[in-house]
Image: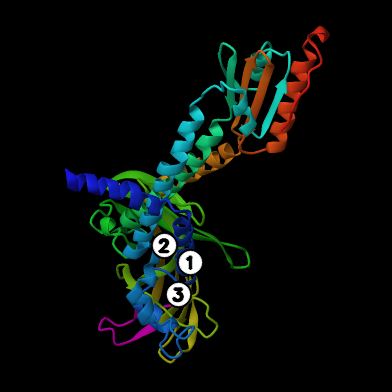
Amino acid sequence: MNLVASVRRYFRHELLPLLADLRLAIALLLVIALLSATGTVIEQEETPAFYRANYPEHPALFGFLTWRVILKLGLDHVYRTPWFLAILILFGSSLAACSFTRQWPMLKAARRWSYFTRPQSFQRLPFHTHLPHQTLHGIPERLRQRGYAVFQEGNRLYARKGVIGRIGPILVHVSMLLILLGAIWGSLSGFTAQEWIPSGSTAPIQHLTGAGELARAHLPTWQIRVNKFWIDYSPEGRIQQFYSDLSILKQEEEVKRQTISVNHPLSYRGVTLYQADWTIDSVRIRVNNSPSFQLPVVPVRTESGNKLWGAFVPTQPDLSQGLTLLLPDLQGTGLLYNQDGQWIGSLRQGMSLALNERLTLYLDEVVGATGLQIKSDPGIPWVYLGFALLMAGVVMSYFSHSQIWALQTEAGLYLGGKTNRALVTFEREFSQLVQQQQAANPPFLGIPTAANG
């Protein structure tokens, strides 16, 4: 029992005040901002070869930042590193401690109410006055008209409004805790993947570019089928938009189908599929009266940097001879070259080209492949909820918490009040209350004199 009591005493009197220290919260916030900026500047979730190529050891960026440093410190996946998550947890603990030790007691104090029983108590208030020959008559109604909740017991009165302003800071802290919780949960259970799926093919989610520890063991079991992939071209030949008609298959049964394009993704059970890129996967060719066979294509580098794909088209059964087919785009036009590199003609999709009396080529189909960017972040709903509460909390924090006390004695009426913000507005309101009270009294009660503080 003594050990438990000692732990509680240490937590309440040592650890809790340390976590609630504003300086610690500011320092942690600056560290999080710095690390977030680092994660923004340094490309995330790339391959080791990418960092070796872009962050060499000689010369090192800024004299120290090399690919070895990036990979060793985890700067290639900052938001998933244990030390970044630990800082987020520590910052969340600081916010919770501040709410527990400061904001919550202030709300409880705001909800409590008490009466002043001595005229001397009004001297401690920033706004106070003494109205001789006055009574409480009319004060409660005027305060209620101004939105105050009024409590009265005999010749004593207490009124308040704007308690919501005390709830606002607590709601801001709660919203920030939700945002942190969403970020931590997303880092642990979220993933990103990239898939290249040819038109007419089906594939699971398997090529991960980044994933949290919990996500790797619980990847979606459903598959993606690309029913069709196509590109819209302008009359000048420029790409206007590319589309993928996708189906989500669960145990070979279609559970959702949607056509996606750039900026119009598909979402299913927390996983979002974005149209990110495209390529040419293969071509279907016939030679004379042969069955249609599918030939793979490979990207070809050009000096201008334009996309170009090439395929070897055999013209002999033993593959000893053939032609080169070059495809500049997905519009279905290919360029044929012989073994000497000489152009011998163009071949369009659905058409044929007679090379000689014995050889005719048919281009049945140019098969495109869609490039999908796949993301899952289960923490996003928590982050959105946190931001919504944050905006509500900020608005609520602007409400002034105002309090007014009144005491009627044989010497007259004592009035006083205070507020936590908008002092000029409250001073004007308090002065109007005093003037209305003085104007409502019959002249024969005497000439009131006020001592304003």
- 134 vs 71, left or right, is right
Q: Secondary structure at mark 2?
A: strand
Which quadrant of the view contains residue 134?
top right
Q: Are marks 1 and 3 in contact (CB under 8 Å)?
A: no
Residue at the spot 41% in from the left edge and 63% down from the top edge: 371
The kind of secondary structure element at disc 3 is strand
The disc label shown at residue 34, or none = 1
Spatial distance from mark 2 to mark 3, Cα to Cα?
Answer: 29 Å
In the rendered structure, which amino acid carries the disc numbered 3?
Leu
Residue at 67% in and 16% down:
139
| Residue 231 point in image, percent of width and height | 50, 61
Q: Earlier in the sequence, mark 2 or mark 3?
A: 3
The numbered mark, 1 or 3, whose residue comes first in the sequence reads 1
**Label 1 packing within 10 angstroms: few (<14), some (14-19), many (20+):** few
At label 1, the amino acid type is Leu
What range is drawn magenta here? 309-323
Vertical relation: 355 (above or below) 231: below
**Pointer 3 residue:** 353
